[in-house]
Amino acid sequence: MLIQPEPYFSVRLAQTVLDRQAAQRLRYRVFIQELGGDGPLVDHENKFEADWFDTFCDHLILVDERRNHRDLDHVVGVYRLLRGDQAARAGRFYSEAEYNLSPLLLSERKLLELGRSCVHPACRRGTAMYRLWSGLAAYVSDHKIDILFGVASFHGTDLAGLAAPLSLLYDRHLAPPELRVWAHEDTYQTMNILPQKVLDRRRAMLQIPALIKAYLRLGGFVGEGAYVDHAFNTTDVCLVMDTARMNPRHSGHYMKRPIL
């Protein structure tokens, strides 16, 4: 069934303090209230999920024009974007705390780290994620990005309960050596948990979050090793996508340029 676009949605980069605070308010609702995360810079009093990297990043936001900006509820979707030049000013990429990114950093290609992606619960059945991805495609084109990457999360920290989907990702979607980042040794969790002969691939795929499956359909890969993030109550994998290898059948759906 074709989903009609909501005319009251617009996609753009955050332009004001209110835009950024509304994005952090949405992140608080999703990552703290809904998923049970926390962090040293989370502002529980004002309900902002924030960290040190926010100052250096671009924030791609989906705005519901029917909502009041001054109430900080107008942002209903967000992607945090950190280019290589911005990471240089910040000192590193966010995901370098979890993964060794040497294959990407030494590639001399233009990098874009994706993070803090979330959509308001009331908007998850419509075109919100499609609109965000279309905005992301325009950003990638404008900045001539070669490689997109970032940590993506499974809810929860029980590796035994996630053994099947992690094993499936390792078996079917491990990045080629030239793109294969890996979890740091001191926090490395193997993804190769279940023997392939006992793995029910269909059931395992059902356990993989929709966002990760969407990246895989576009031609994305995962790095080696998982990271258990107890602060955010998640188990992370690192997704890597080379724009030159994107699946044209699926990528064309998102590459229709929106007005930002």
Image (spheres, rainbow, N blue to C red):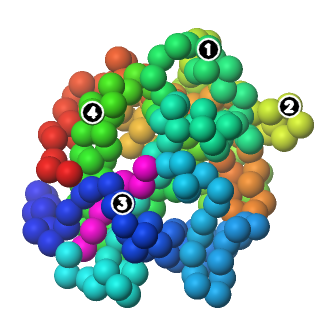
Give how far apart the Cα atoms at labels 4 and 3 are: 16 Å
Please indicate, yes or no, whether residue 28 appears anywhere in the rendered image. yes
Q: Is residue 119 left or right of residue 90?
A: left
Name above or below for residue 62 compared with residue 224: below
Element marked by disc 2: loop
Give the residue type that dot 2 points to. Answer: Glu
Element marked by disc 4: helix
What residue is drawn where x is 52% and y is 38%?
86
Closer to the observer: label 4 or label 2? Answer: 4
* Circle 1 Cα neighbour tier, 10 Å, few/some/many (<14 / 14–19 / ≥20): few
Front residue of 139/213: it is 139
Looking at the rendering, which quadrant does residue 31 occupy? bottom right
Closer to the observer: label 1 or label 2? Answer: 1
Give how far apart the Cα atoms at labels 4 and 2 are: 36 Å
The residue singled out by tag 2 in the image is: 185
Q: Which residues are magenta?
A: 58-64
Q: Is residue 86 left or right of residue 235?
A: left
The residue singled out by tag 4 in the image is: 142
First in sequence: mark 2 vs mark 3: 3
Give the residue type that dot 3 points to. Answer: Ala
Instruction: Evaluate if marks 1 and 4 touch, with contact meaning CB atoms under 8 Å apart.
Output: no
